[in-house]
Image: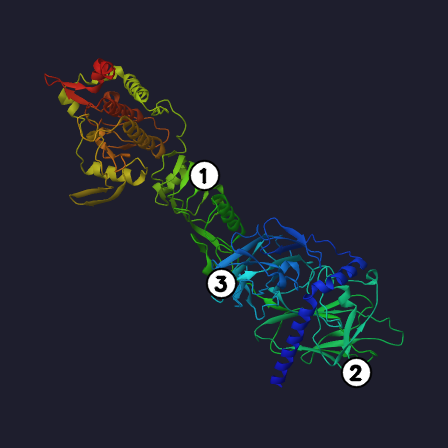
Amino acid sequence: MEGASKWVLFLEACLIFSSLIISFGNYNVAAAKIKEERAERKLANDDQSGFISIDCGLPKNSTYIEETTSINYISDATFIDTGVSKMLSPESRVTHQQQLWHLRSFPEGIRNCYRINITSGTKYLIRASFLYENYDGQNDLPEFELHLGANLWDTVKLENASLSVTPEIIHVPSLHYISICLVNIDSGTPFISAIELRTLKDTTYLTQSGSLSRLRRFDLGSSSNRGYRYNYDVYDRFWLPRAYNKDWKSISTSFTPDSFSQNDYQPPEVVMSTAATPLDATASFDLSWNPDNAGSQYYVYMHFAELQKLPANESRAFNISLNGKYWYGPLVPKYLSTNTIFSQSALSGGQYQFSLYMTENSTLPPIINAIEICIVKDLLQSETEQGDVDAITNIKATYKVSRNWQGDPCAPVTYLWDGLNCSYDGNEPPRITSLDLSSSGLTGEIAPHISKLTMLQYLDLSNNSLSGPMPDFLSKLQSLKVLKLEKNNLTGSVALELLEKSKNGLLTLSVDENPYPCSSVSCKNKKNNIVIPIVASVGGFCILLFAAAAIFWIRKEKKSHETVYKYNGEAVNEVQMSKQGSKEFQNEVKSMLRAHHKNLLSLIGYCNEGDNMALVYEYMENGTLEQHLSFDCNNVLTWIRRLQVAIDAARGLDYLHNGCRPSIIHRDIKTSNILLDKKLQAKISDFGLSKSFETESCTHVSTEPKGTFGYFDPQYYKTKKLNRESDIYSFGIVLLEMITGRSAITRDLDHAPIHIIQWVGLDFWKWIL
């Protein structure tokens, strides 16, 4: 019996395929007849507002109305970024509807996905179509997976090049879009011909779990061997003629569409106008199938309508049994009115046999017009949380990310987007926790969409060309533990909250090698901020302005200058601190661990074990600025290079004053503490004497004077009040050294010390002119 059943199933399959060829094949022959029928019918269902009809591979911006169905099709170009458009040969197109003439092939990438915007919570019938027809000339039928979002929908296995495969699923998306993905499983190149979505009423195809994949949908009473779809069916379902059964016969009726009463399922009137009934009026009407997978679950939908106006002495009533047990009844079909009976819960087990049999008082045998059998698809893998998906999609669009970011960002884990990491918590939606876009060629400002990734713990945007301000919204990412922004062109504020988290060890913050990062509190122009004039013409005029500015800064403190250098040598030497002790060592380590800037020397490591104290810095190939200023040296800096070095040092100093929280006063700015790398980029070093302002409102710190003779701020020495202007004075001395090529302190013929300010006041203008 088992072998016989297999042969029956085989013959039924053959008949179905034959019917498909007949019904959906020779449209060039049947088109005129179908058009004529459509013109004769009153089409109340000609509204395609709930339809999305996509012809895959159709040229961008192209649209058309398919001739036999009047369905409006559009190109797939706006729904996907990958794949190659192909077209069937002219002879292959003759026997197929137009939406199957084109296709999109995916020779590159493992997973390629369409993203289609829909209305979340709405019930959709989703159908994909695949027709090979040897479009690639390889005569090699491929096999590949079809995914809906993060879940496997079906495996597309083509067995005949001239027959289309059309998997279909009824699904209620939880997001406002769906992803339909083609996945390469190394069994040929994936491709797709068409994608169609149709909205359904919420009251139809009710299930207690999962989505529904079509197994069979039969017009049981058909005697024409013709299939139907839109616009006979308002939902554009495919209805195939019944499989042959020698124990059945067909009955039909003539009616006008206005006279037929439909329910929410709305099976086509042309389908409901015929019904199957047993040849033997006393026999039962049997329907059966053997599932391929014993673990599968099914829902069955049976559609009934009485087609005969019964006289008073006749009646039709019957019960339905499943595998010999009562299932439903008695059922009395209403005249020209659709009644749908369906399983209230999923059916599971082995073989299924439904039997329709007369009740004792019935005079007529049972009838059935149409049947739908669906397999439950448990799409168990949760899709990434909607807010995260929207955010990462906007980030992709903003930066035009060229990576293969398609489908669900986090699920399944096998296809996790490159550069992302996600968290997975049971049945909860995955969340994006890490985003690495380093060295990705990013330009423009830091995208505000990043702030929507609320569970982000790791963010790396380093080594790009990002510009604009340091955005405050990054401080709103409460879970952020690592933030890498170095090697960009960012300016402006580092949010105080981020600096505080970094100081407290809650955040690893990297902002090195950006031109001008500073604190969000102190980015406004201030009276005593360092100003470096930069003009388009960089000849002698630029240098002259540069010199004039330096002299102006120094002369603002002229009275103090004249006072300090009258102190005897012994008094001045008391503030000369060039060697570091343990306190200075600890101070430098603490300062360097929290100060990060492209114009500050980077601390690589340190050792502090007993009397062994060592600091390890990055290597600076060109030594100190002091070594390159004398006009007698071999590697003297050009005027333009000196100007750039001055700008570099000014940026580093401004970061210490305004970019760090608390602010740092260096206290030992001098040419020997400004180092040059292999590209002659300047970096400030030696933080052993540095001092921090502990509060934002602090204007000065009272402390014993420390510094280097020649660079020391006389006002600081006189009042013992340290502030930012103390460093600015020292930097002014550095500028004068860079302009004149003289040291801060020189000696005359009598070996008396001459400060550079004294020389500037007496001889500079003679020298410069």
Is 199 left or right of 679, judged from the image as shown? right
Is 565 left or right of 318, judged from the image as shown? left
The disc at residue 444 is 1
Q: Is 724 above or below relative to 681?
A: above
Image-quadrant location for residue 73: bottom right
Image-quadrant location for residue 363: bottom right
Q: Front-most of 678 and 415?
A: 678
Is 629 left or right of 657, judged from the image as shown? left
Q: Which one is in front in this view, the residue at disc 1 or the one at disc 2?
A: 1
Query: Are the two marked residues, 3 and 1, in contact with CB atoms closer than 8 angstroms?
Result: no
Q: Earlier in the sequence, mark 3 or mark 1?
A: 3
Where is mark 3, residue-wise? 184
Query: Are the two marked residues, 1 and 2, in contact with CB atoms closer than 8 angstroms?
Result: no
The residue sitting at 67% across, 55% down in the picture is 51
Where is mark 2, residue-wise? 282
**Residue 499 x/y as whole percent:** 37, 39
The amino acid on which the numbered mark 1 sits, given as a three-letter code, is Gly
Q: Earlier in the sequence, mark 3 or mark 2?
A: 3
Q: Which one is in front in this view, the residue at disc 3 or the one at disc 2?
A: 3
Q: Which secondary structure lies at badge 3?
A: loop
**Residue 259 x/y as whole percent:** 84, 62
**Residue 91 x/y as whole percent:** 63, 63
The amino acid on which the numbered mark 2 sits, given as a three-letter code, is Thr
Q: Is residue 372 visible?
A: no
Q: Which secondary structure lies at badge 1?
A: strand
The amino acid on which the numbered mark 3 sits, given as a three-letter code, is Asn
Q: Is 653 above or below relative to 317?
A: above
At label 1, counting other C-alpha atoms closer than 10 Å, the crowd grade (few under 14, some 14-19, many 20 or more) is: some
Q: CA distance from mark 3 to mark 2?
A: 54 Å
